[in-house]
Image (cartoon, rainbow, N blue to C red):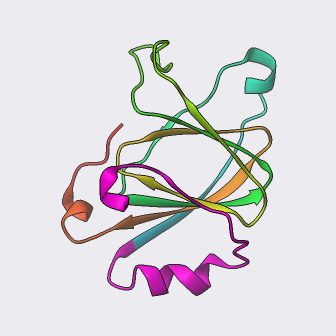
Amino acid sequence: MLLEKQPIVIHDRIVDTNDIIPLWFPYNKRHEFALAAPMAPAETGELAWNRNGYKYAFVHCTAPGEVILSKTLMADGAPDPSETLAAIQLEPRQSIILPYRVYYSISGGCSVNVTGIDDIITSLWPRPK
């Protein structure tokens, strides 16, 4: 399923990702960081987009909100108007696994912990901007 470049939503409530990520990805390099939905987009309607530069990104929700997915962005940093965006509502302790080079935005007050997962080959690839 991960090879098809489709996101995987995990509905089970995961209390601590440190319990499962080493079991699921024991030989992979892992990079952890946190993201929160910026306050300004609620007023302007604009979203801050991130691009997954890891083979997989394990996104674990710590505060309820929404993760919006896009395959491409235009030169102005907005998704292509003809593209259908995927919006996934996440509750605390739910997770989603994103494939390489997918654009994602955190909104609705969502706060997430992201674990970037690379193997030996993808750790050598340049990170997309």
Query: Image quadrant of residue 26?
Result: bottom left
Does residue 125 sit above or below 129 in this rendering? below
Residue ID at (32%, 52%): 4
Is residue 2 magenta-colored? Answer: yes
Q: Is residue 67 above or below residue 40?
A: below
Q: Position of residue 112 (x, y in %)?
A: 67, 56
Q: Looking at the image, is 42 positioned above or below residue 37?
A: above
Tell me the quadrant of the picture where the C terminus can be found.
top left
Is 92 left, or right, of 101 in this rendering? right
Name the residue rendered at 45%, 16% in the picture: 80
Numbered label tally: 0
**Res. 55 visible in picture:** no
> Is residue 125 toward the left or the right of residue 110 in the image?
left
Which residues, given as a range, are shown in magenta? 1-29
- Where is residue 38 drawn, in percent x and y? 72, 36
Q: Observer-nearest residue: 36 or 70?
A: 70
Which residue is pictured at 37% across the width and 61% down the height?
A: 1
* Residue 12 part of the magenta-drawn span: yes
Task: Give the x, y percent position of residue 43.
Answer: 81, 19
Q: Please tell me in which quadrant of the rendered image residue 31 appears.
A: bottom left
Q: Position of residue 71 (x, y in %)?
A: 41, 33
Query: Residue 128 versus residue 74: which sits nearer the camera?
Result: 74
Q: Is residue 101 left or right of residue 116?
A: left
In screen coordinates, is 14 left or right of 2? Answer: right
Residue 30 visible? The answer is yes
Which quadrant would residue 25 be assigned to in this image? bottom left
